[in-house]
Image (cartoon, rainbow, N blue to C red):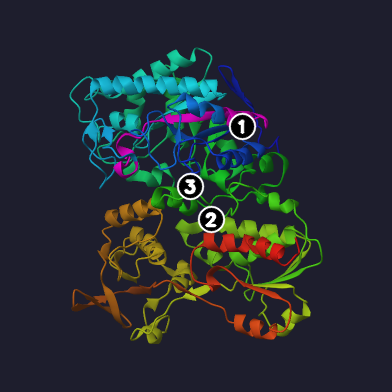
Amino acid sequence: MKKEYKHIFEPFTVRRMTVKNRIMMTPMGTNYGEQSGEMSFLHINYYEQRAKGGTGLIMVENASVDSPEGSNGTTQLRIDHDNYIPRLFKFTETIHKHGTCVGIQLNHAGASAQSARTNMQPVSASNIPSKEGGEIPRPLEKDEILRIVKKYGEAAKRAQTAGFDTVEIHAGHSYLLSQFLSPLTNKRTDEFGGSPENRARFARLVMEEVRRQVGPHFPIFLRVSADEFMEGGNTLDDCLDYLQYIQEEADVIDVSCGLNGSIQYQIDANHFPDGWRSYMARAVKERYNKPCVTMGNIRDPKVAEDILARGDADLIGMGRGLIADPEWVNKVEFGDVCDIRKCISCNIGCAGNRIGINRPIRCTINPSVTDGEVYKKRRITKPCNVVVVGGGTAGMEAACTAAEVGCTTFLIEKKPNLGGLAAEISKIPDKKRLSDFPNYMIHRTNKLKNLFAFTNMEADVDFIKSLKPNIIVNATGSSPLLPPIAGLHENLGKEGSNVYSILDMIEHLGDYPDDMSGKKVVVIGGGAVGLDVVEYFAPRGADVSIVEMMPVIGNGIDPVSKVDINTLMKKYNVKQMPNTALKEVRPDNFLVEADGEQKELPFDYGFVCLGMKAEHPVLQQIREAFEEEDVEIMNIGDSVRARRIIEGTEEGRNILNTLEKRGYL
């Protein structure tokens, strides 16, 4: 494997730091920090898993150089005082044991701070919020700017003292330096505003002060939003222009993109192709002849190798990919790339948890983000037969986990193939990345010699009994919710009617023309499923309307997907109809009601996407059949309640708790 990916495993040296390979873990907030701003031991476990996994350079999530004013999270790391050095030193010492280099990103949130968390008004270049609906910040005075410059330098010196190999200055993503660089948020008329040189002055002073404090041998990374992807914001050409004023002290330029208002580019939406950003890094590298980092949905090692081989970038940045699989590098170097648990860019457990609802990060496909796969070292203490009914992702996780600790495991799936709803949804073109997870799970299932999968088979109670189960797991998933609305059951998917479900749409994907101009599509249901339909038809030129009974369309979806779909709906003039109820379904129109008034919505294609409901056709029979026996029966995933993949994966892994409770582990 190492020969096949020779560029990935070529060492990289900058000043006195040599990184053993070209994979850099990019800084992503975790909400794992202590309330005091100190690094927690949970943090150390989390990053150590990625160091053990072979990562060449870990760039730790952003640390505040000036709290509380510059803080952007409730449990953000701090590096604005010497008392944070001891724990940071313990951290760097731990990471270095694995041959991994480690840096830390230094940041001031500016207008991205929240007064509810800091108890003070945010500050910025001007009085312009960092995002639509954000708080109005207070413009910084010149003496305050110079004070913050010193704070950056002092923070960098602390990082050096604490044993970090490098620091990264964050000048992108709608944080303070970015707010000065961007014409969208900098309307100043003094020496810190106006021309590109003036807007870059703050960042230049920071870079110079950091160099002064850390000396000539310590590498400095600079992260920028090379293209802000917002009307009136900096383009790639603009970035190439202003970099002339701030790049001199930068040893490596970390070429990111996007702002708060274009977060789907900053934290890549799942439909962007692998490595799509590398052209930006190449442009910066060619202009300034400096090493660059690129990132952007890079999951496949072949993509990473090709980017390096072409010379587009010198380091491959991976954030979510290493959250999903901390062993990514080791699997590429020593194992089978099919064993990589590739991030599906769903942005639910990471961005959705942290940015959306202020929780610590989790991962849809990795139920053990901080501890890794230590459970595989455990073994059952006595024979145990596990029967899992349902071969979706939740069922496969339960089956694989049980088999990996030594249980004889039987997996029963009524359809011809494993994968469940995730495999079906991934057939939608913009959702194809989702298929990586069921494919990984199927590969994992097939590798286990003590896991026997039966497909195309109904879960018959007598057959289950013949397997002599000690534990039975029901994971039979969900089906479209079809409430008793007039005309719904009579018209859905019926001949002579144009009313369909999401599963009907998937079944007929090959039948829809690429150009649907003049066709009317009406979608009932403004949740994730309904928005998948909108995302498919709107770019094809259809006249699309989406109806939602609740006040908000897209309620509960992660912030990246929300910005992305809202941008798409605006671009393609999708008619959004919140606070509107479906009253009757007809073959070619829906009768809806809003504000007490009813009206017809005619369509060429009508989709009813009112969510999913739990399906557990054999659970009661199983319970009755084993009522008198000492058999543990679990119900997990969507067959409990229709939810998301992340809950099913967690519940599948939780079979370990049942094994422990029943004395098998």
Q: Secondary structure at mark 3?
A: loop
Which dot marks residue 273? 3
Q: Earlier in the sequence, mark 2 or mark 1?
A: 1
Given the image, on which type of amino acid does mark 3 rest? Pro
Q: Residue furthest right?
A: 382
Instruction: Tell whether label 1 touches label 2 (CB within 8 Å).
Output: no
Q: Nearer the viewer, residue 222 or 355?
A: 355
The quarter of the displayed image where residue 401 is located: bottom right
Q: Position of residue 195 (x, y in %)?
A: 23, 23
Depicted 353 relative to depicted 555: above or below: above
Horizontal side of residue 445 vs 90, given as left or right: right
Q: Nearer the viewer, residue 365 or 67?
A: 67
Given the image, on which type of amino acid does mark 2 rest? Thr
The quarter of the displayed image where residue 64 is located: top left
Residue 545: tell me if it is visible: yes
| Residue for point 67% across, 79% down | 459
